[in-house]
Amino acid sequence: MFSHIMIGTNDLDRSKKFYDAVLGTLGVPAPMMDGHRMFYMTPTGIFSVSQPINGEPASHANGGTVGFAAASPAVADAWHAAGVANGGTTCEDPPGVREGGMGQMYLAYLRDPDGNKLCALHRI
C-alpha cells in the first residue's frame, strides 16, 4: 500500500543517530543521504526523515504513529532500548502484550527526538 513514509526533523544529525540505532535493531541498513533528507531503504518500503523544504520548523503529528514490524518481542524490546539510549523517550505503557480487536500484539512505543510517535509491533 505505501511506497514510503517521510517525517520531519529539526536536526538531521540527531535524527540519524536515533534512527540508525532503532532501525539497526530491525536489520535496516544505514540510510542514503540526500542533503537535507535521509532514506532508509528496505525491500518492503522506504522510511525517510527530512528537514522541511519550506524552511518552517518540523512538528510531529498529534494522533499520528509510525509503526515498524518487529520479528519478536525481544527485537521490539531491543528497538525500544536503542531508542531510549539515543535520545528518544518512552511513551504509552511499557513494552508488552496488548489485547485488542486485532488480537494479541507485543507493542513498544517511543517518541523520537523531534516528538514523532513510533511503535515496534510484533503480532503474536
Image (cartoon, grey):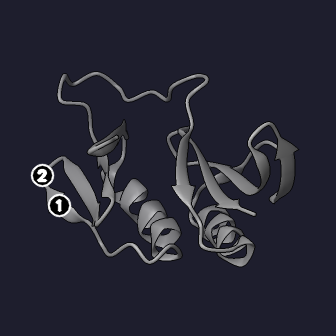
**Which residue shows up at 30% across the image and 73% down it?**
30
Dot 1 corresponds to which residue?
Answer: 33
CB-based contact (under 8 Å), mark 1 and mark 2: yes
In the picture provided, is 98 more to the left or to the right than 61? right
Residue 38 vertical placement versus 124 (above, below): above
Numbered label attached to residue 102: none
Quarter occupied by residue 105 = bottom right
**Which residue of the protein is positioned furthest toward the left in this rendering?**
34
In the picture provided, is 116 more to the left or to the right than 44? right
Location of the N terminus (image quadrant): top left
The secondary structure type at the circle numbered 2 is loop
Q: Position of residue 110 (x, y in %)?
A: 65, 50
Quarter occupied by residue 46 = bottom left
Dot 2 corresponds to which residue?
Answer: 35
Q: Amino acid at mark 1?
A: Met
Q: Position of residue 50 (x, y in %)?
A: 27, 42
Alpha carbon distance from label 1 to label 2: 6 Å
Of 121 and 23, nearer the camera is: 121
**Which residue shows up at 44% across the image and 78% down it?**
27
Pointer 1: residues within 10 angstroms few (<14), some, or many (20+)? some
Of 120 and 117, nearer the camera is: 120
Q: Position of residue 67 (x, y in %)?
A: 55, 48
